Image: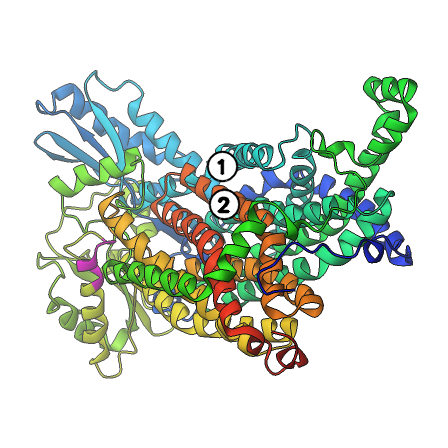
Amino acid sequence: MSRTDLIEPAPAAASNVRPRRPRGAFVIAALAVLWFLIGASGGSYQAKLTDVQKNDNAAWLPKSAQSTKVADQSERFNPVQTIPGFIVYERPSGLTDADKAKITADAATFRGIEGVAADEVGAPVFKGTVASISVPLVGKDHGKAVQGPDLVATEKAIIKAANAGAPAGLAVNSAGPGGLLVAFIDAFSGIDGALLLAAVAVVIVILLIVYRSPVLWIFPLFSSFIALGAAALVIYQLAKHGVLTLNGQSQGILYVLVLGAGTDYALLLISRYREELHNYDSSVDAMIRAWRGAAPPIIASAATVIIGLLCLTLGELNSDRSLGPVCAIGIGCTVIAMLTVLPAYLLVIGRYWAWTNPVGWVLLTMNYRRWRSLEGRWIFWPRVPHVDHQADIATHGWWGRFAAALGRNARRGWVITAAVLAICVIGISGLRSGGLTNTEAFTNPPDAVNGQKLFDRNFSQGEGAPAVIIADAARADAVIDAVKQVPGVAAAPGSVCIGVDYAKLAAVLKSGATVPPAAGCAPQQLRLGAVDGKVLINAQITDRYDTRAASTTIQGIRAAVGTVEGAHALVGGQTAINYDIQQASRHDRNLIIPIVLVVIFVVLALLLRALIAPLLLIATVVLSFTATLGVSAVVFNHLFHFADADPSFPLFAFIFLVALGIDYNIFLMTRVREETLKYGTRDGVLRGLAVTGGVITSAGVVLAATFTVLGVLPLVSLAEIGFAVAFGVLLDTIVVRSILVPALSHDIGRRIWWPSTLARGAE
């Protein structure tokens, strides 16, 4: 047979051999029942995952960071750790006496709200048309961190109190790190509702289009929910007992990944099942044959994704370290569900449907032979596969014609495709990943962002979020003098001081004594004392804590205190936290990406038993990844007008695009290898493309669509990941896997299998 002739069908006799039903079939059935029970019982835990989320700094920062060490040591000075926050009032025409009376009364009201650091609530500051009150939130109380939902409840109680009885026309907004953090946490509250519903709706629509069946779409979706329930059950227990950290970002990606990957695996298995139903009278025999053919590539692709995700645990950043195991558990549960629950569900419902509904009874009564012909096959209606030995779909259909045309123009195809992708790569020079400020982090700015902008225009931007320095008490004066000289540190009296002991201040005020306002630092008797020879120093910064200018100031402070001999100073605080997160993100990106490439190469080499083919696949997926980053940069800058990208964006995009991109190449190349054993390399490439083209393209569309729904949550970082993964998956599925890989493999010929024996076989 010629290299591009795809007309000769596979021998019918060989495909009609009845497979022996091994004991493994009963094992699969038992596992299906067990996994169904686990997934069903775990469904209730999906809503509970939010209860064990951690979106505070500890959920992101590495333990080795200076800011983490400062936060830990600060607890010895203040057992109650606070998150700075403000309530900002505005009346454009000017504050009235009634406004000022209300604002003054609010300060006392705020002190009585549970979750507010009452001792640290400040006096109102009036400035023309605006006013502000410092209302810190309790973030950690004697070592116990306050959970996200509790922070949200406290912030909402504060806003409610501020609005209660407010004179008409007086606007009230939250601001500061506390308000923005609560807005960030609150944004993830849509995970259990809007995000999941949007993802499910998208999957249903696409499956209806792909299968053109009013019934078949139910099976993949049902199995995905079983997988999601099982994953939620495992992750909840691990997060609750501190084995892993779950944050809102990890949970959001988990949902779309399980639905997307689960549907992909289901598409591959169901496609193979439909193919085998053309060869076997028994749906059980067809499923056994389909399972044997589909399980190896599904398991291999899932293993590749899991290994790639677990490489994230090698990073410093806790958000990276948490995303890896959380999503790896999700993929593990998904592949088990799709290889146990899905085939069992297809068989049970397919075989016994006629006994369970009136339509089946009518068919059984009117035409028993017709009913028997639909047994196990009706789920594909109206495109019901019959035993006609026409399963060799590589010989006909659109993908067969496309594969034949590609074989005739292989070199031209891969050269043009590679050139187009290379042009897309050029855009990567415009990718900005320096990090987003908290006011830039929302696609739909909440009230806290508007309040922060109002605060920045009227008050000292660095107020409420000082740099926190822990140093030896004996060198405190030298450290203070050094910090005062750093550009970006406030120059006003009292800007760099040993911290105030709010417990002492509260005791003084409770006794009825007054504390006269001071232009400089607090009186000696109200300062924090030394603990184990260390003191805590606060340094006011002129810029807002989450800006690049503030990060530059932190670097200057660290450099300055580092020159003070014997001080052993560490610098933390809100700005230092942001800076350390960005540095850890860059470290993780540079460390993990090469490791993932090596790991995936090893997996592919073992799977394909070759070295050239794995190198070829990795090179094409990396080209696709860099082209995606180039296009993403153009879209982010000129279409979406995002201010920047999160430093972790390139790493997350790489993990998902490369791992999932390799998935589709595994699906393709394992089938190519199977066909190569019968027909030679070049014909095997074309037949593999023809057979897998439709199902893999459908799988790519499903996965891309599910990641797109990350845009439902109003966070720029998730919108960026969603777009990049969706576009990259489509690019990889439609262009790289459909044209570049098969054309290049066809052009190279049998040498792609070197050093296996296939490299010495037929071209």
Query: Quarter-wise, where is residue 665 in the image?
Result: bottom right
Front in this rendered view, residue 710 or 605: 605
Could you tell which of marks 2 and 1 lies nearer the N-terminus?
Answer: 1
Neighbour tally class for label 1: few under 14, some 14-19, many 20 plus, Cα within 10 Å: many
Magenta stretch: residue 505 in it? no
Quadrant, the N terminus: bottom right
Taking 753 as reference, is 184 left or right?
left
Taking 304 as reference, is 150 left or right?
left
Mark 2 belongs to which amino acid?
Answer: Gly
Asked if residue 330 shows in the view, the reply is no
Mark 1 belongs to which amino acid?
Answer: Leu
Front in this rendered view, residue 430 or 275: 275
Query: Quarter-wise, where is residue 652 in the image?
Result: bottom left
Please provide percent x and percent y for residue 757.
Answer: 67, 81
Quadrant, the C terminus: bottom right
Residue that badge 2 annotates = 252
Please provide percent x and percent y for residue 171.
Answer: 21, 25
Residue that badge 1 annotates = 195
Q: Secondary structure at mark 2?
A: helix
